[in-house]
Amino acid sequence: MLRWILTIIGIALYIWWMRRRKKKAEKGEKKDAFSKMEMRTVRECKKCKKTRTRKFKRGDYVFKDDKKCKCGQKTIITGIYTVKVKTKKELKWEKEFKKWQY
Ligand SMILES: [Zn+2]
């Protein structure tokens, strides 16, 4: 009799644990989707050819004039690209990985 009770409790715990894990995974995915990508704008100076990147702003497009460079010449946007922003989970993993590297 005791064996049966233990088995039932075991199964119940297993189901509860699986459900919790599924819920957590769903929550995590939703959060990640929001902070996954970030747009960046590359601007280049016509004179000294220095390139700088900054956050993408609305209205940015390639070959658009941008802020002045330190040398006084106007810069133009030469590229717009997206980067994957690391999620908290990934950063944590990276930290763990670095620990083991040395
Ligand atoms: Zn310049």
Image (spheres, grey):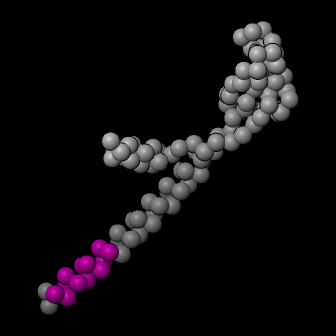
Location of the C terminus (image quadrant): top left
Viewer-nearest residue: 2 or 84: 84
Q: Main secondary structure of the magenta part?
A: helix
27 sits to left or right of 95: right
**Measured from the top left, where is residue 26 in percent x and y?**
51, 61
Residue, x 43% and y 45% (percent of image)? 94
| Residue 66 showing in the rendered view | no
Determine whether 20 is above or below 79 in the image.
Answer: below
Residue, x 54% and y 50% (percent of image)? 31
| Residue 44 showing in the rendered view | yes
Location of the N terminus (image quadrant): bottom left
Q: Residue furthest bottom?
A: 1
Determine whether 22 is above or below 79 in the image.
Answer: below
The segment highlighted magenta reads: 3-14
Viewer-nearest residue: 46 or 9: 46
- Is 10 inside the magenta-drawn segment? yes
59 sits to left or right of 88: right
Q: Residue furthest left?
A: 2
